[in-house]
Image (spheres, rainbow, N blue to C red):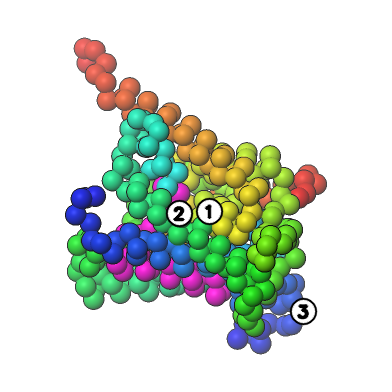
Amino acid sequence: MNGNRHPLFMPLIFVGGLIFGFGLGFSHMARPEVVLNFLQFQDFGLLFVMGGAAVVSGVAFALMPRLRERAPLTGDTYGRRLKPFDRNVLIGGAIFGVGWGLSGICPGAAYASLGVGNVTILWALAGMFVGAYIQGVWRSQRATSESTPTGAD
Amino acid sequence: MVTELIAPALYETLFPAGISRYAVGGLLVGLGAVVIYLGTGIPAGASTFLESTLSYVSDQSRFQQYRGSRDWRIVFTLGIVAGAAVYALTFQSGLVSSGLYQPGTTGELREVGGLTIWLTDVQPWRLFLGGILVGIGTRIGKGCTSGHGVCGVGSASKTSIVGVITFLAVAIGTAQIVMALGVSP
């Protein structure tokens, strides 16, 4: 898929990221303190960030599949973001929740935080890569051992 | 408007910084995701970048499965960093102002050659330890605040709604405990 991508594919991804990151900066979500203030019930503004973003994406995700079949730059069909539910959603969500509650930072906001000049956030970014690496190695190895034949039965 | 529906004192308590910067910022976050979705059909999330980028340095199958998207995920992340930098150059530096934007009082602002950068006061150990848990949890839990919270909830996905309720409830509990233990900032 890398060879014959539309020439506007990468520029569009960048522009989307640009708007996304500007929004995270403008809404102060790139500031862990503001997220912690929400989680500690001192400022409920974050609800409007999540709500505003979900409303905009909700309209697009509901309308686009009815208006057009395929996306212009990839030829992919418009679908919704649906992932199968299993207990990993609860386990992972809970682990993420502890990390978010402790640090006040999530992945997208951490990238944006670097953009507003917050070099201290490199601690969080380093932690995220370490965490993603730990679970990746563990789950890769478990997947390998499960798919290896285990003898007679 | 919301301001007229509830008593001013209550509004002030719930939203000491107003709601406009949050609502406008949220709409832009949604718009950024929608621009990518309209052009490509991809419901983008921010946390897959962590694993897809690790595929450059590790052969583990968990990371290698993202080889096909790792290049554009880097571009997406660089876009996020650049977009926030544009905000820093304009609103954060005071070059541009708006009635919809209220500056904050958190953290530390520092002047660096005409640009105002912002630095957090939250202690590095909290960021690092929290970051590790965020890295593990978002990947096991199939998404983060953007994947589940923006694109998933926007898709009315039950998995994502359950995911958001889970991490939101646990995060509130954790942050309340951290505060009760007197850990600050």
Highlighted magenta segment, given as a residue range: B23-48
**Tag in front: 3 or 2:** 2
Amino acid at circle 2: Thr
Q: Which residue is mark 2?
A: B77
- How far across and how far down the image is residue B98, in percent? 63, 81
For mark 1, what is the residue? Answer: A111
Q: Position of residue A106 (x, y in %)?
A: 55, 52
The residue positioned 41% from the left and 50% from the top of the image is B74
Q: What residue is shown with label 3?
A: B9
Q: Earlier in the sequence, mark 3 or mark 2?
A: 3
Does B91 sit left or right of B59 as displayed?
A: right
Task: Check contact, mark 2 vs mark 1: CB within 8 A.
Answer: yes
Residue at position x 25%, y 70% in the image: A65
In the structure shown, which secondary structural element does the residue marked by tag 3 occupy? helix
Q: What residue type is disc 1 on? A: Tyr
Q: Measuring from the top left, give residue A137's x and y in whole percent.
A: 42, 29
